[in-house]
């Protein structure tokens, strides 16, 4: 490649690292929260500081025929944005936030963290359905759908995206909304890592903050698994939309010696009385809990901080998930096999009642169902007791492969598409997305999904 083709413009404020440069490996590793970084190496890593840097980076990629993968927060467990060859475009530094309380709207950069925007909104008694974990960049979160706090009531977070600014495959900055570049707006709400552009700003609809936030919990030994699965399946469709009923299976559950189950009912209500009323169904939970709490009011930031105890920093993760509507009789045999092989904490299984009742707008996001199940194999480092580390690494993939015949799809937030093919979008939506990519990214400047050849979209006209 010529020097002219690889030279950044004079006003480029960011940094660029080629594979031979000092700092390249540090930049590659810093792009993922998962320490279990894959052996994939971009030709160049560009750390953009502003919108003009993004434009320059896309034009640089065009000049060198590099395929682009974009990173905003780095919470992708599969490290989807780290690809062999091409450009890794890091937009995590585009994190500005502007809030218009009167218009109930906000403009946020893709690198803005959910917990960051929540803190700013809380000060003005406003709300947005941020992700459950701290540190999640809004760029990836919103693109893949936005499975967030209180989403059962207010919808997937991408439904509250009013518009975007984006840099297309030709390096031009544009705006997209329901009335302008509407096809791109459709794709941006759910395409996830298959989106064919780089979003530099999201325009969001905000909500009044629920006056009461908190949770009620109960703790069981793992031999109650069948009773809890059957109970959750029975009550799930009637659980009020103010509540996200979930349970977690782990070898480190409070008050439990050995494998246990923590049932959690987070509540977002307009009064303490409404919260108590909505929690009435918890009186029907199975007997035999080692401990149960009353409803405990707390800040959303506290809820997220407690979630993070199961997703510690500086660990390796192998993750997979599924949506399902299968019966307990169908699910329990595989779930029991999975629990029998449960690795040491913080590895865990997450079951969440979802039971969507809201009609979704027309958008790329189109995979969800009654129940969400995810598996998280987590271990400290490659030297962790050898066999124990290997067990945690393979447990999630093996478990989801066992459950796969009962799945109706997956969500892109915890995808493992590089290792296991799965349905992540309605077929008609995926076909439409392929046609749009062929039209708007004819040279294939942006990567397709892991496990799906970059040329496949162009061949599926």
Image (cartoon, grey):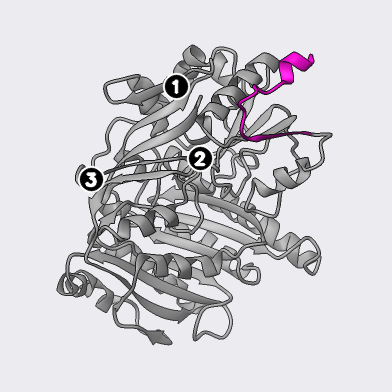
Q: In the image, which is nearer the foreground, mark 1 or mark 3? A: 3
Q: Which percent across, then down, holds residue 85?
A: 73, 28
* Relative height, residue 77 to residue 335 (above, below): above
Q: Which percent across, then down, holds residue 431?
A: 44, 21
For label 1, the SS is helix
Q: In the image, which is nearer the foreground, mark 1 or mark 2? A: 2
- Give the magenta range: 1-18
* Relative height, residue 385 to residue 441 (above, below): below
Say whether residue 419 is visible.
Answer: yes
Q: Nearer the viewer, residue 347 or 150?
A: 150
Q: Earlier in the sequence, mark 2 or mark 3?
A: 2
Q: Earlier in the sequence, mark 1 or mark 2?
A: 2
Q: Which residue is mark 1?
A: 431
Pointers 1 and 3 in contact (CB under 8 A)?
A: no
Q: Earlier in the sequence, mark 1 or mark 3?
A: 3
| Circle on res. 104 | 3
Q: Which percent across, then down, holds residue 84?
A: 73, 32
| Circle on res. 94 | 2
Q: Callout 3: 10 Å neighbours few (<14), some, many (20+)?
A: some
Image quadrant assignment for residue 220: bottom left
What whole-number distance in Å separates the C-alpha atoms at marks 2 and 3? 22 Å
């Amino acid at each position: 490649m010529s020097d002219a083709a690889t030279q950044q413009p004079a006003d480029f404020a960011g940094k660029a690292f080629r594979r031979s440069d000092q700092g390249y490996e540090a930049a590659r590793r810093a792009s993922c929260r998962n320490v279990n970084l894959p052996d994939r190496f971009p030709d160049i890593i560009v750390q953009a500081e502003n919108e003009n840097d993004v434009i320059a980076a896309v034009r640089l990629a065009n000049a060198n025929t590099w395929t682009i993968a974009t990173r905003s927060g780095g919470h992708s467990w599969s490290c989807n944005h780290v690809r062999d060859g091409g450009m890794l475009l890091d937009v995590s530094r585009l994190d500005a936030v502007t809030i218009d309380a009167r218009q109930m709207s906000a403009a946020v950069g893709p690198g803005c963290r959910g917990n960051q925007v929540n803190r700013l909104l809380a000060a003005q008694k406003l709300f947005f359905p941020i992700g459950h974990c701290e540190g999640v960049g809004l760029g990836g979160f919103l693109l893949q759908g936005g499975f967030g706090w209180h989403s059962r009531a207010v919808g997937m977070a991408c439904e509250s995206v009013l518009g975007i600014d984006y840099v297309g495959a030709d390096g031009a900055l544009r705006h997209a909304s329901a009335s302008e570049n509407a096809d791109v707006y459709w794709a941006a709400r759910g395409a996830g890592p298959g989106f064919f552009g780089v979003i530099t700003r999201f325009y969001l609809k905000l909500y009044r903050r629920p006056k009461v936030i908190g949770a009620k919990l109960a703790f069981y030994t793992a031999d109650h698994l069948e009773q809890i699965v059957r109970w959750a399946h029975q009550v799930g469709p009637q659980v009020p939309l103010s509540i996200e009923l979930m349970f977690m299976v782990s070898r480190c559950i409070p008050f439990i010696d050995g494998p246990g189950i923590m049932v959690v009912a987070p509540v977002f209500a307009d009064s303490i009385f409404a919260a108590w009323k909505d929690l009435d169904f918890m009186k029907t939970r199975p007997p035999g809990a080692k401990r149960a709490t009353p409803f405990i009011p707390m800040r959303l930031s506290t809820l997220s901080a407690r979630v993070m105890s199961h997703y510690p920093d500086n660990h390796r993760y192998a993750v997979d998930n599924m949506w399902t509507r299968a019966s307990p009789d169908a699910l329990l045999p595989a779930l029991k096999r999975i629990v029998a092989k449960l690795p040491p904490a913080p590895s865990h299984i997450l079951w969440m009642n979802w039971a969507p009742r809201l009609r979704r707008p027309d958008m790329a996001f189109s995979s969800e169902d009654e129940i969400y199940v995810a598996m998280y194999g987590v271990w400290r480092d490659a030297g962790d007791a050898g066999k124990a580390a290997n067990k945690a690494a393979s447990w999630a993939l093996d478990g989801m492969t066992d459950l796969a015949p009962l799945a109706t799809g997956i969500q892109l937030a915890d995808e493992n598409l590089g290792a296991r093919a799965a349905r992540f979008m309605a077929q008609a939506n995926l076909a439409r997305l392929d046609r749009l990519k062929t039209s708007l990214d004819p040279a294939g400047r942006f990567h397709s999904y892991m496990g799906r050849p970059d040329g496949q979209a162009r061949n599926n006209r």
